[in-house]
Image: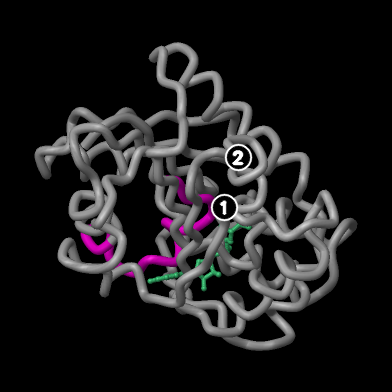
Amino acid sequence: MERIPEPELMEKKEQVISYDEADFSEGEFNLINQINHYLLRKNISFGEKDLIVDLGCGPGNISEKLAIKWPNTEVIGIDGSKEMILRAEYNNNNISTNQKKLKNLSYICSDIKEIKSSNFLLKKKISLLVSNSLIHHITNLEDFFNTIRILSSNITVNFHKDLKRPFDEKSALELKAQCSTKYNEILTNDYYASLRASYTFKELKNFTLENDLASLEVFEEGDKYLIVYGNV
Ligand SMILES: C[S@@+](CC[C@H](N)C(=O)[O-])C[C@H]1O[C@@H](n2cnc3c(N)ncnc32)[C@H](O)[C@@H]1O
């Protein structure tokens, strides 16, 4: 199936509300566990000096879980959508999991393409650079990989998870139908657009090989997801 890009930022209020209200917690906890296993395997532990950045953080579901899992680190969620960042801040101020504002978590509204190595973040090196469901929003793959290259140093562990583009339209429609049994129409349509905008394993793998990023591993998780991890 050919890739059909979708708008990068999720800015419509109803889209943001639908996304925020949906329960994706199972996948989110899986992601945190996967990152944790990877860090344990590499003998990496985090403390006060460490900075974790969640790119395309949306309403902050993953950022919050990172901040809870590694409470001594500083966690920053970044999203280019003002509406999403407002939601993420509201969630942390009002309804964070343990009913207390997570003090080690903050948010920044910025397009990932506009983060330059000279700005705010790089006062501290990033120890963990994460994204979930971001890559498919990025129109050109080089914008995503340039960003993680700029933000990474020799200590940065990258962990990025995203949808994998279905093989054909029929498979995409089947996944859309499954989604519609759990989520509302706005979210189901967004999911379908995301599936069509996603990249394939081959596209991601080839990009890393052709652009001096072979130190990053790319692998498929089941038949729905792709993971890019390692050091840049
Ligand atoms: C599908 S949501 C994922 C949110 C969150 N990571 C999660 O897993 O719940 C994708 C998010 O990426 C953001 N995004 C897309 N392109 C972006 C860009 N170029 N710069 C910053 N944020 C971006 C969107 O605004 C949206 O909030």
The residue stretch that appears in magenta? 130-143
Instruction: Find residue 120 and report its image quarter.
Output: bottom left
Q: Residue at x 71, y 64 (%)?
A: 92
- Residue 39: image location, x then y, percent: 46, 22
User: In the rendering, at what x and y percent does residue 23 appear?
Assistant: 82, 55
- The residue positioned 21% from the left and 45% from the top of the image is 207
User: What's the distance in space between the residues labelled 2 and 1, CA to CA?
Assistant: 7 Å
Left or right of residue 169, residue 153 in this image:
left
Percent across and percent down for residue 25 are 77, 46
Instruction: Name above or below for residue 80 compared with residue 34.
Output: below
Q: Residues within 10 Å of mark 2 (few under 14, many from 20)?
A: some
- What residue sits right under mark 1 in the picture? 104
Q: Is residue 192 above or below residue 41?
A: below
Label pair 2/1, CB-CB below 8 angstroms: yes
Q: Is the residue indicated by label 2 positioned so its CB lies within 8 Å of ligand 1? A: no
Residue 56: % across, % down = 48, 63
**Image height of 12 relative to 60, above or below:** below
Identify the amino acid type marked 2: Pro
Residue at image x 11%, y 44%? 211
Give residue 194's mark.
none
Residue sitting nearer the eye, 111 or 105: 105
Is residue 138 on the magenta stretch? yes
Query: Is 216 contained in the magenta span?
Result: no
